[in-house]
Amino acid sequence: TTQAREVAGVASSGKAGDFLCTAQFLEVYQEGVYDLLEGSCPALKVREDLERGVYVEGAAEELISSASDAATLLARGDANRHTAATAMNHVSSRSHAIFTLKLTTVVEDQESDLELR
């Protein structure tokens, strides 16, 4: 995929058995899907194709290398969630959040070129 080719540039010095980890943080709110890592943006479209399966078109996918990076993304995205006061909670979430981690393995092919799987 295009995303994998972009990430491949980061892995150009990787060795067989190495992996890359990327994260997305999405929100489902009032029948729309929003990218929490991008802040205020219009609703994104959910798509499906044979190669990628179901995905959210235009959603940011950020490279992370530690639990600390993941926690930073969670905090950044959480600040962008839709919230409102209720009788029981003054800052209640009004949405569903999806934090996705994707691990991509770097393997060497027969010609010593790197390949992502």
Image (cartoon, rainbow, N blue to C red):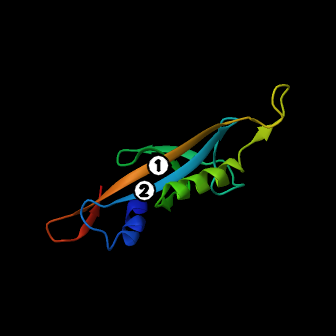
Mark 1 to mark 2 CA distance (whole Å): 7 Å
- Residue 29: name its quadrant: top right
**Rendered location of residue 94, percent (x, y):** 73, 35
Figure check: 19 above or below 52: below
Amino acid found under the numbered disc labelled 2: Cys
Secondary structure at numbered mark 2 = strand
41 left or right of 25 in image: right
Neighbours of disc 2 within 10 Å: few (<14), some (14-19), many (20+): some
The residue at which mark 2 appears reads as 21
Amino acid found under the numbered disc labelled 1: Leu
Q: Residue at 82% across / 26% down in the picture?
A: 88
**Rendered location of residue 28, percent (x, y):** 63, 39
10 left or right of 33 in image: left
**In terms of depth relative to the viewer, which is nearer, 40 or 50?**
40
Q: Residue furthest top?
A: 87
Secondary structure at numbered mark 1 = strand
**Rendered location of residue 109, percent (x, y):** 18, 64
The residue at which mark 1 appears reads as 101
Which of the image's four quarters has the N terminus? bottom left
